[in-house]
Image (cartoon, rainbow, N blue to C red):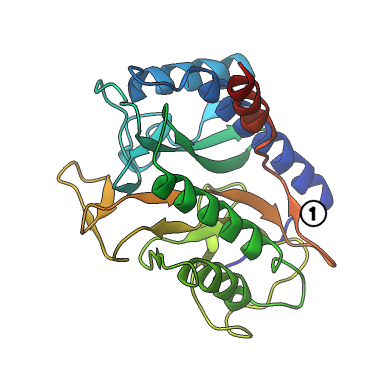
Amino acid sequence: MIYLKTDEEIELLRQSNMLVAKTLGEVAKIIKPGVTTLELDRVAEEFIRDNGGIPGFLDYQGFPNTLCTSVNEQVVHGIPNNKPLENGDIVSVDCGVLKNEFYGDSAYTFEVGEVSQEKRDLLLTTKEALYKGIENAVAGKRLGDIGNAVQRHSEARGYSVVREMVGHGVGRNLHEAPEVPNYGRRGNGTLLKPGMVIAIEPMINLGKRNIVQENDGWTIRTIDKKISAHFEHTVAVGKSEADILSSFKFVEEILTLQSEN
């Protein structure tokens, strides 16, 4: 069942998503070679709790941490650990927050130190694909329009789209209907209506689209061990354009400052 949100509920969702955005900004401040993903996780949990939120992923269906941190060939659901990040890695940081009884959910894939042009190109295309999908989160369109936009943009540049992992509705529950695939046919799927709030989250691979689950029961990686990138926004379907409830503003302000120093 798809729960349509009132304007008041969408504002509460915006508050939760702004806390997610600011948390990712705090994480951006410390990502560098030598830092462990457990350190990122500790900073995120402390920041969320200090700002009146509850980590949305911690203990969700048994997940052990605040962040999902997926490095290089890991696609999503990576468990933070004590292994230092290395120069040239990429790391997807997925964060969820519960605040005022509503969830926020967003993800950003970071460069660690100096990365190859091949990795930068994948990150750029994945982020572009996210916004291509968001352009179609408009009343009167269908879920297939979102997936098709993501798929066409990514495949046109020679990448592959993960099929098994999808976006989802967001509200009082972290995962609600509908599922939001990153592939599809235009004009197909569920009709989009005002009040729908969905997380759009392309997971785009450098190599084959196929994935496997690691023995930890959580981490999803590419089957050919080539890199994967992941960006995610939570958006409210609008009458003329999507309302992006999460933000990369805080992350990108930090990254800009770091590049200037």
Nearer-the-camera pick, 183 or 45? 183
Q: Compared to 3, does 82 lie above or below?
A: above
- Secondary structure beneath dot 1 equals loop
Look at mark 1 in the image and give the residue it sits on.
6
* 214 displayed left or right of 6: left
Q: Compared to 253, does 196 lie above or below?
A: below
Identify which amino acid the numbered label 1 is placed on: Thr
Nearer-the-camera pick, 150 or 61? 150
Label 1 crowd (10 A; few <14 / some 14-19 / many >=20): few
Residue 168, how many percent across, how many down? 53, 59
Examine the rendering and report whether any part of residue 99 can be seen.
no
* 235 displayed left or right of 33: right
Residue 197, how many percent across, how many down? 67, 56
* 51 displayed left or right of 90: right
Q: Quadrant of the N terminus?
A: bottom right
Examine the rendering and report whether any part of residue 153 can be seen.
yes
Q: Identify the residue at image location x=78%, y=65%.
A: 194
Q: Identify the residue at image location x=28%, y=50%.
A: 220
